[in-house]
Amino acid sequence: NQASSGGDSGSTPATSKTITLGFSQVGAESGWRSANTKSIQDSAKEAGYDLKFSDAQQKQENQIKALRSFIQQKVTVIAFSPVVESGWDTVLKEAKDAGIPVILTDRAVDSPDKSLYKTFIGSDFVEEGRKAGQWLSDKYKDAQEEINIVELQGTTGSAPANDRQEGFMEVIGSNAKLKVIASQSGDFTRAKGKEVMQAFLKAHKKIDVLYAHNDDMALGAIQAIEAAGLKPGVDITIISVDAVKDGMQAAADGKINFIVECNPLLGPQLMEAVQAVVDGKEIEPRIVTEETTFTSEQAKEALPSRQY
Ligand code: GYE
């Protein structure tokens, strides 16, 4: 953020050394992830950082390898979106011992030692789950019979899967008619969402609601629901999280009834945090992104200007 002119005056500190940012991404499992990757790549370029980008294909062991390789290469800063919450202490200590600051983006780790990373930038997933649960609870506030819910969970052990379930259960617990009758992971992908929904439809005669932890799984499930001769959004009420373009389109078409937004455009905030860390500035230990929700009507309005 410094002007580059007059750098030869002798008194100017050596700021010209290019910042190398090692970034370990979860994978390419969803529309959200693609938008997130693009945001990070674009913002790193704009900031003039040398980005070393590594795709873990949804596997923790690949991420640990990537982090160790970044440490060996002596990158300036490491950032990553941890695929699951647990099991990071050892490698994070290695980074700390090597004097390389770490920033978490998108997903959190459950390490009790907060000194292992500088900040965590991302959404409040528990709150997202609460918003989903609240909409449903309101919709069925006068229900006379039991409302059967099936849940498509995100990647097992990931922060968004854990938290979106927690927030949702917390809120629907106050409406005795709302019952989760089946819950399984669809790994945040369309293919798995479809497969698991097929199994749900086979096993359960009466499904009133689908709560999917992301749009892609909901979109896969919609295919299964249509193939079973049912109308998504009508015969089965559908709630999902993310609000990527395809999800918003399905909502505008009345196939998804309610979407909780989760913002993938974390690149600019991440680059700011990297710069602050490099400059030795104070940095907030938790940076929460701002988000909203969409009904079908609201999705219709927002769709034309949706970036991702
Ligand atoms: O909701 C999902 C993606 O971690 C918030 O990961 C992210 C989640 C997002 O695969 O679509």
Image (cartoon, rainbow, N blue to C red):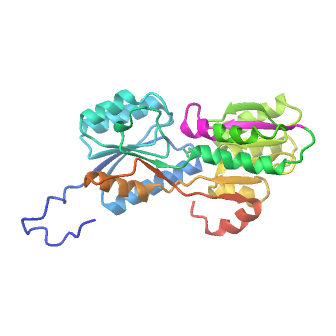
Residue at (88% x, 37% y) in the render: 146
Quadrant in the picture for the C terminus: bottom right
Q: Give the image location of residue 243, x and y in percent.
A: 64, 55
Residue 216 visible somewhere in the drawing = no
Relative to the observer, which residue lies in front, 286 or 81?
286
Image-based side of 225 in relation to 220, left or right: right
Image-based side of 196 in relation to 287, left or right: right
Magenta residues, start to end: 146-164
Please tell me in which quarter of the rendered image ligand 1 is found: top right
Query: Measured along the vertical axis of the image, is residue 74 above or below residue 7?
Result: above
Query: Measured along the vertical axis of the image, is residue 60 above or below residue 232?
Result: above
Residue at (25% x, 33% y) in the render: 97
Image-based side of 98 in relation to 256, left or right: left
Was residue 102 drawn as part of the magenta stretch in this picture?
A: no
Q: Quadrant of residue 63?
A: top left
Was residue 161 drawn as part of the magenta stretch in this picture?
A: yes
Quadrant in the picture for the N terminus: bottom left
Residue at (30% x, 46% y) in the render: 77
Residue 254 visible somewhere in the drawing = yes
Relative to the observer, which residue lies in front, 245 or 160?
160
* Residue lying farthest to the right in this orientation: 144
Q: Give the image location of residue 76, x and y in percent.
A: 26, 47
Q: Give the image location of residue 199, x and y in percent.
A: 77, 31
* Residue lying farthest to the front in this orientation: 174
Relative to the observer, which residue lies in front, 166 or 256?
166
Q: Give the image location of residue 61, x and y in percent.
A: 43, 29
Residue at (50% x, 33% y) in the render: 85
